[in-house]
Image (cartoon, helix red, strand yellow):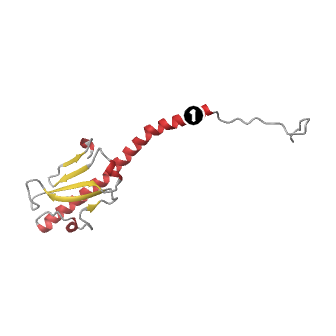
């Protein structure tokens, strides 16, 4: 039971809140953590999406080799390899893959597969690995600011 004061009113209890300084300190700490953590997170997500390009390139290369065994030549038409579109859209839709004859050669002898970020894909912002290339001789290259670590 609450005891009433002489005036008949209930006693005033002290309610303690946060001071403005405490709130500002928390906002600053959270801002610093976000400034450090968000770019690292975005980089990690972009890196994981690169697997979509590599997977599509490897699938297309396997189908090119099967096409060579069956037809005696490679092809630059992704539909001939059994894909629905030319250029091929990767499974997750982050990249498009297309084929051309290798430099100085013909499709009867060699091919070059190239994966580029699909239009409107978040991978267009990935400046570290902007393009992946897989050649029929097994050579794997990439372009971008960190091209040596893309594959």
> Measured along the vertical axis of the image, is residue 13 above or below residue 47?
above
Residue 105, horizontal then vertical, whole percent: 8, 56
- Quadrant location of the N terminus? top right
Residue at position x 44%, y 38% in the image: 35
Task: Tell me residue 36's x, y (percent).
Answer: 43, 37
Q: Is residue 41 left or right of residue 97?
A: right
Residue highlighted by disc 1:
24
Residue 52, position as x, y percentages in the image? 31, 55
Q: State left or right for residue 30 relative to residue 50.
A: right
Mark 1: which secondary structure?
Answer: helix
Q: Position of residue 123 (x, y in %)?
A: 33, 51
Q: Nearer the viewer, residue 51 or 15?
A: 15
Most extreme residue toward the top, as rendered?
21
36 vs 139: above or below: above
The image shows residue 95, relative to residue 127, as above or below, that is below
Residue in the picture at 33% in, 59% down: 93
The residue lying toward the viewer, choosing from 41 and 74, is 41
CA neighbours of label 1 inside 10 A, class few (<14), some (14 to 19), many (20+): few
In which quarter of the view is residue 63 placed? bottom left
In-image side of 52 versus 40 (left or right): left
């Amino acid at each position: 039971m609450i005891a009433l004061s002489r005036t008949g009113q209930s006693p005033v209890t002290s309610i303690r809140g946060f001071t403005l300084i405490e709130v500002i300190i928390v906002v600053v700490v959270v801002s610093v953590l976000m400034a450090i953590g968000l770019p690292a997170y975005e980089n990690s997500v972009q890196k994981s999406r690169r697997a979509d390009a590599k997977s599509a390139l490897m699938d297309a290369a396997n189908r090119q080799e099967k096409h060579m065994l069956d037809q005696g030549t490679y092809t630059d038409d992704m539909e001939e390899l059994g894909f629905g579109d030319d250029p091929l859209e990767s499974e997750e839709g982050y990249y498009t893959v297309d084929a051309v004859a290798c430099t100085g050669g013909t499709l009867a002898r060699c091919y070059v597969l190239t994966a580029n970020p699909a239009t409107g894909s978040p991978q267009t912002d990935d400046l570290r690995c902007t393009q992946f290339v897989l050649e029929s001789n097994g050579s794997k290259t990439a372009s971008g600011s960190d091209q040596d670590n893309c594959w």
